[in-house]
Image (spheres, helix red, strand yellow):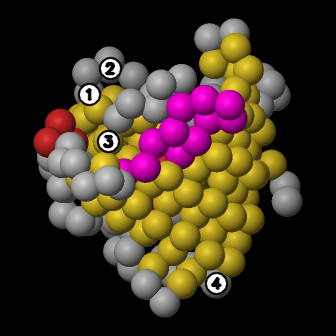
Amino acid sequence: MEQSSGKVVRWSDWDAAGLEHLSLARTGTGTVVDSLVIGVHEGLPYGLHYRLKLDPQWRVRELLAERAGGTGLHILSDGKGSWTEAGGGALPRLDGCIDVDIAATPFTNSLPIRRLALQQGQAQEIRVAYVPLPDLDPRAAEQRYTRLGNRRYLYEAIASGFAAELEVDEEGIVYDYPDLFRRLPV
């Protein structure tokens, strides 16, 4: 899935109470994702800015996330499953995590979809750094992705039993996430 030099994507949450504006830019060392999300979590409005630096294989190398007026997170990865705080402290609880899953966005489901490059009918269980709202305190989570068709994937959160069929565009970017997010025209 070749990516153009730049792309803008927008999603609304299912009940239209939130919006995400995301830009992707190819650099000499990979892809930079920059996004602003506004929404409601457990009845409270929030604003979130996040920035991801991805290597050419779409492995997360850096995550910077900041809530408007609140919590911030800045972590780095070697792309092989070892994470540190931006200040250098090791994060062994995230050992083995290649991808991140930020609760506020459907985009981070695209990371393993792009990186794994599954064939139709193939499935893979992975460990991700899950970043919840409102505290942005990452923890490891087990997930499974199964490629159902040309542009359809089954996403499963192993611990909770949650599952959703995701539709992606020609570049593997989530298009439709039933009951949670839908793509908007740009």
- The residue sitting at 75% across, 52% down in the picture is 21
Vertical placement of 106 versus 134: above or below? below
The amino acid sitting under disc 4 is Ser
- The residue sitting at 39% across, 79% down in the picture is 56
Chain part drawn in magenta? 65-75
Label 1 SS = loop
Q: Give whichever of discs 1 and 3 has the lower sequence position.
A: 3
Residues at badges 4 and 2 in contact (C-beta under 8 Å)? no
Q: Residues within 10 Å of mark 3 (few under 14, many from 20)?
A: many
- The residue sitting at 38% across, 30% down in the picture is 137
- The residue sitting at 45% across, 42% down in the picture is 73
Q: Residues within 10 Å of mark 2 (few under 14, many from 20)?
A: few
In front of the other: label 4 or label 2?
A: 4
Farthest bottom residue? 28
Residues at badges 3 and 4 in contact (C-beta under 8 Å)? no
In front of the other: label 1 or label 4?
A: 4
* Disc 2 from disc 3: Cα separation: 17 Å
* Disc 1 from disc 4: Cα separation: 35 Å
The amino acid sitting under disc 2 is Gly
Which residue is under mark 2? 161
Left or right of 173 in this view: 117: left
In the rendered image, residue 67 lying in the magenta stretch gets the answer yes
| Place of residue 164 in the rendered image (x, y in percent of width and height, measured from the top left) | 47, 32
The amino acid sitting under disc 1 is Ile
Residue 5, labelled with which disc? Answer: 4
Q: Give whichever of discs 4 and 2 has the lower sequence position.
A: 4
In front of the other: label 3 or label 4?
A: 3
Q: Give whichever of discs 1 and 4 has the lower sequence position.
A: 4
Left or right of 28 in this view: 99: left
* Disc 4 from disc 2: Cα separation: 37 Å
